[in-house]
Image (tube, grey):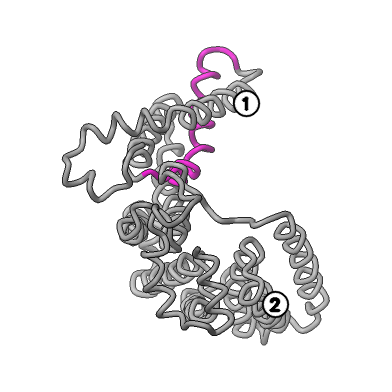
Amino acid sequence: MIEGLEAAVADRVIDRATAQRLEPYLSNGALVPDAVDPDDEKLRLVTGFNDIFVTIGLSMFLGALGYLGSSWGLGGAALAVAATSWGLAEYFTRKRRMALPSIVLLVIFVGTVFLAVLGFMANGGSVFHAPDELTPERTLVAASAATLAAIAHWYRFHVPITIAAGVAALAAILLALCNMAAPGLLADHPVPIFLTLGLAIFALAMWFDSSDLKRQTRRTDIAFWLHLLAAPIIVHPILLSVTGSDAPLGAALQVILVFVCLAVVALVVDRRAILVSSLSYLAYAAGKIITAAGMESSSFATSTLAVGAIVLMLSAGWRPLRRSVMGLLPSSVRARLPAVA
């Protein structure tokens, strides 16, 4: 049904505003024959193998274009790739509505706009020669351009990941402003700054989630990408500070505790993406515990095995585990979350 609305907008049968107003009605479970349980957390990445085939071609074409344009400097090459990716999106996104190519083209477009602005500000468009050329001021300008690029792309193509890309650019703006206002603050106190930023993005993701509890409209895809963005911003600064401890075994136990807390949050909001960012740290923790137990020679394989087993058990037992956790919450809170099957 939603794909039909997109086709109608592309053919100018109805406008975008009308399509968005119709979505909740056409996404009603009684009207969509293939409606699925929210716990399945469906994500539209590919509509067929042609998506993968086209994505390979896009990657090769745009990669080669960037390489051949390197004689124009970083700014010129990135600008050429950005303009070409927009043009390709006119066909593969706006006309063909291909999921994976649309995601790839959006990421390339916003990323190369960022690089193009940085390139033109540094050495007249040439490649950076020193790390200090990436100053907060230049980051601020480039991130602002990337934000405007994401906004323009959203109004033209409405690819769900665009919101997350724009929010990432906004986050870069805020971090640049923080560095400009208080140099050294970000380096000295990364955890509270990144934690606040990540929680704000998480709150935005929950706002989109709460507006589509059945997870049948574009809003649930927007929420997914925002959760995927928020998770590493929240998780990495905390766990990096823990793993930098002088007591490896104690740090490993703290990592496991953080993972358990994240697992509870993931079960409550029914978003597995929250756990993905912490899996590498969980493997680190398992490795430290296995080494302490005298199995250092096989610590990598054994820790990977343990983490894989945990992921599989969470996947197999997701619904009963979520049912148990949700049973502890007040009914007023449960009403704002996806139902448990």
Helix, strand or loop at label 1? It is helix
Dot 2 or dot 1: first in sequence order is 2
* Residue type of the residue flagged with mark 2: Leu
Residue 300 is marked as 1
| Tally of marks | 2
Residue 88 is marked as 2
Residue under the point 23% across and 44% down: 334
Q: Which residue is nearer to you in this view: 107 or 299? A: 107
Q: Which residue is nearer to you in this view: 184 or 152? A: 152
Q: In this view, does 280 lie to the left or right of 203?
A: right
Q: Give the range drawn in magenta.
A: 270-295
* Residue type of the residue flagged with mark 1: Phe
> Per the image, is 281 magenta?
yes
> Can residue 185 be seen?
yes
Image quarter (top left, top right, bottom left or bottom right) of the C terminus: top left
- Vertical order, 282 against 29 (above or below): above
> Can residue 133 be seen?
no
Q: Quadrant of residue 247?
A: top left
* Cα gap from disc 2 to disc 1, whole angstroms: 43 Å
> Per the image, is 40 magenta?
no
Q: Where is residue 54 in the image (x, y as percent from the top left)?
A: 75, 64
